[in-house]
Amino acid sequence: MKLTFVSNYINHHQIPLSTRLWQRLGADYTFVQIEPMAEERKEMGWNSNTESLEYLRLYYKEPEYCARLIMESDMVVFGGVEDESYIEPRLKAGLPVIRASERLYREGQWKAISPRGLMKKYRDHTSYRKKEVYLLCAGAYVASDFNIVKAYPHKKFKWGYFTETKKYDIEKLMAGKRGQTAGVVEILFAGRFLPLKHPEYGLMLASFLRERGYKFHLTMVGGGELDGSLRDWVREKKLEAYVTFTGYKTPDEVRKEMERADIFLMTSNFLEGWGAVINEAMNSGCAVIADAKIGAVPYLIHHEENGMVYKDGNITEFMVYGERLVRDASLRKRLGMNAYETISKTWNPDVAAEALLKLSEGIIKGEAVVQSEGPVSVAENISPSAGYRYCRTK
């Protein structure tokens, strides 16, 4: 089977899956990159080692070859590209396609009332509802968005981003956490300092914990437009002894921070389509506190089993869970170990690659092969307002 994955650009969140597919298919697997990576992402270390990837082809350098490959492949996975012209010839030819998509209505499903938007969604998606076109939902709220426009009925499957999964001696990993080795609970935030990421939640938690006399430390990895105001706030509140700003770090350096951290904060709002740092933090045995409306959360976290989930924007609930985890070492360890198991056994690139290949082969043979759980299992229509409950009732 010749499989081609088409996306805007490859990065460290996509390389592990692509590498597994290439290991299985060899020269029959290609990742087609549509455009150069944005400079901001390069500055964050996202493009390291991509030029050496044997399976990578650049559409903007080899347009004729890549266009022909898209048409001649047995299966094409298409996602992360707003310009439909790259996949349109294949769709019009009636050839099978698997789309991979984040949310249609990230800013709110009320936007579905736009007539112009509905016409485009019908043209790009709904018109193929009876064709051999399937949807990988990169986030728990994607299926609900596409259900609004009646696209891909019974052909929507759970998907996401699959970061490199490391194998640890889990007991040794947990024993190496700073809360165990130094008696100071290490809290970590890693991401861009943008309003949608709410990095200020970490500083508010630090102030809250300092007032109550807990032994802790907060590391803030990243940078961005809020950098100056966050540092000013720390100085204002005299939190310098409790908070460290590191600036941006490479993906490998961030993973090292996660390995020593006890708690990881994922405080983005509903604009976070997936949130791949959650995969990495869970794989590193962190007890994760996450907002329910982040795309990855309902798929990856079950509240109080392998993480803590708070209602979107509810800072009080967030604080309660933060204090509880700082106070309770046994709870941190249990959540961290279960989080590691979730990633190492189910939500990882090996499982995802195998599931995607089975789905592709099944579609080509006339019957899609769906998994019972995890990647390429049936994606339920979870509305954004229901995600908080979903994380508690599975």
Image: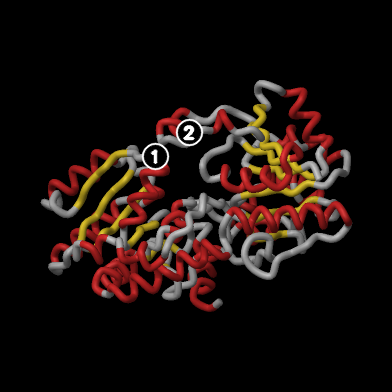
What is the x, y in percent for residue 58? 65, 27
Please state which amino acid type lies under the numbered disc 1: Thr
| Residue under the image location 45 percent in, 75 percent down | 305
Hey, which quadrant is residue 7 in on the image? top right
Q: Is residue 118 visible?
A: no
Badge 1 density bin: few <14, some 14–19, many ≥20, Cα 10 Å: few
* Residue at mark 2: 48
Q: Circle 1 sits in a helix, a strand or a loop, which is it?
A: loop
Q: Circle 2 sits in a helix, a strand or a loop, which is it?
A: loop
Looking at the image, which is closer to me, 220 or 381? Answer: 220
| Residue under the image location 83 percent in, 51 percent down | 132
Q: Are dots 2 and 1 in contact, CB under 8 Å?
A: yes
* Residue at mark 1: 250
Residue lying at the far bottom in this picture: please name it.
393
| Residue under the image location 19 percent in, 47 percent down | 233
Please state which amino acid type lies under the numbered disc 2: Ser
Q: Is residue 31 above or below residue 154?
A: above
Looking at the image, which is closer to me, 294 or 61? Answer: 61
The reply, left or right, for residue 57 in relation to residue 167 is right
What is the x, y in percent for residue 116? 68, 43
